[in-house]
Amino acid sequence: MERSIEDIQKKINEKTAIVMSSQELCELIEKGEEVTAKDVDVVTTATRAIMSGTYALLSFPVNAPFSFKRASKVFLNGVPAHVGPCPNESLGMLDLMVFGTAHSYLESDYGGGHLFRDLVERKTINVSVITEEEDTFQTSTTLDEMPYAKIYATRHTFKNYAAFVNCSSKPVSTIFHVTEFEPDMKTATFSGCGQINPLKNDPYLQTIGVGTRVLMNGAEGFVTGEGTRSSPEKPNMTGFADMHTMDPQLMGGFATSAGPECIASWAVPIPVVNDNVLDAITKTDEQTPMSVMDVDRRVTISSTTYADGWKNVDLSVDFKPSSCIKCDVCKAAESCPMDAIYFKNEKLVLDRHLCFNCGLCSTICPEDVFRAELGSIKFKTDSKLNEVPIVLRQSDRKRALELEEKLKRMILDGSFKLSWMVEKIHP
């Protein structure tokens, strides 16, 4: 079976195309139904996770023309920015690159990812400038005052990522856990959206290539190529999108025991153009591999599937503030990587707009204020079967599911057009 993107787009225009989310399709497979090319024309896919390979390019006015020649250092809410490459300071403009994993010198748990979300939420950003003449001045800006503001990906949407355990005998600080990672394989964390991930549904990059139109953080953007550390076994992508139309709930910062990280979201349409694509989209979590790694040595020690993380679990946390006993120190609030748990007017709050659905609060609250079934990682080492409870998810499948449904609606109502690649990516 071979079909062209033009034929599929024509069916979409004629309102005869069958567009399904990857979750819908996988649910049919799990019910034992057979899915053929006649049953689906386009599958929408999505992922939301920590994606370290993220940066922003920002250009905006900060001063009157010719008031200073060059800026040597710039900080946005304390987050360091790299000045240039165009020296536009004499025009009163700054051109900046800001890394998503850059750390603010003002706040230890605030970084580039937090800054990007604050910008998209239209918050006022403090700007500190040190000139080459060592003069300093302060100003402020907002996203609407930035003519150019785009987010770029250097390594996003890995086909499948990994689960992590700590095989050593001592705690480890790492970007793969919010708190220090417990020793002796007592707990596990993992990342990856499994069966709904874009590159799981097109692992050979037959429909995704340079120029493919996507949604990044809810805004229309484009794939630009393969990412760093991309390989045939674990491909990933680069791309960009304009910040002005992004959704703040799909991005942000995430605190870890090794410093703040950056959250990003992607939704990608997969046109079913041949049997290879059809075969990939019909694979469920049980058929989607997830490696198990020792977080201390960063080596693979075993493997399992994404069914461990996403089968028969809760995608969000059940919140019952009436069960709160007002501990002297609220461990859930203290450890929340999104600062989504706090007290307001002496009442405990779980801010669902900030919540990443990581589930950590459900594992550290001594009462039943936060409850969620997170599953466990099951794997073999030296012929021994291990089962390690998951205490943290660094992917948010709940919002990823919402995002692939949004893309499905946009395709059907004509507000999102499929685009065929201009050049193939070779992972």
Image (cartoon, grey):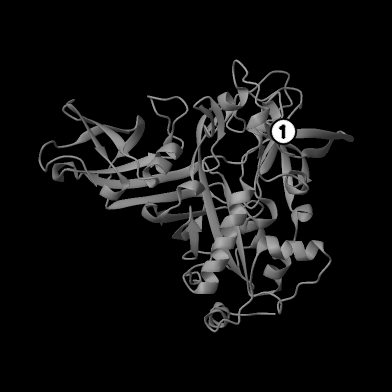
Residue at (61, 22) in percent of width and height: 331
Could one spot residue 334 in this view of the protein? yes
Relative placement, left or right, of 231 versus 261 is: right
Residue type marked 1? Ala
Residue at the right extreme? Answer: 383
Could one spot residue 257 in this view of the protein? no
Residue at (55, 33) in percent of width and height: 349
Location of residue 17 in the rendering, given as x and y in whole percent from the top left corner: 61, 79
Location of residue 62 in the rendering, given as x and y in whole percent from the top left corner: 20, 40
Location of residue 227 in the rendering, given as x and y in whole percent from the top left corner: 52, 51
Using the rendered view, name the quadrant where residue 83 is placed. Answer: top left
Q: Nearer the viewer, residue 122 or 204?
A: 122
Position of 301 relative to 200 (above/below): above
Q: How many marks?
A: 1
Position of 389 relative to 95 (above/below): above
Residue at the top extreme? Answer: 328
Location of residue 409 in the rendering, given as x and y in whole percent from the top left corner: 55, 67
Query: How dense is the environment of label 1, judged by Cα within 10 Å: few (below 14), some, or many (20 and up)?
Result: many
Relative placement, left or right, of 74 versus 327 is: left
Position of 205 relative to 295 (above/below): below
Relative placement, left or right, of 181 versus 344 is: right
Give the SS element for disc 1: strand
Q: Nearer the viewer, residue 122 or 136?
A: 122
| Quadrant where the image shows the C terminus | bottom right
The residue pinned by badge 1 equals 188
Q: Nearer the viewer, residue 422 or 65?
A: 65
Residue at (71, 27) in percent of width and height: 166
Using the rendered view, name the quadrant where residue 318 is placed. Answer: top right
Residue at (43, 43) in percent of width and height: 117
| Quadrant where the image shows the N terminus | bottom right
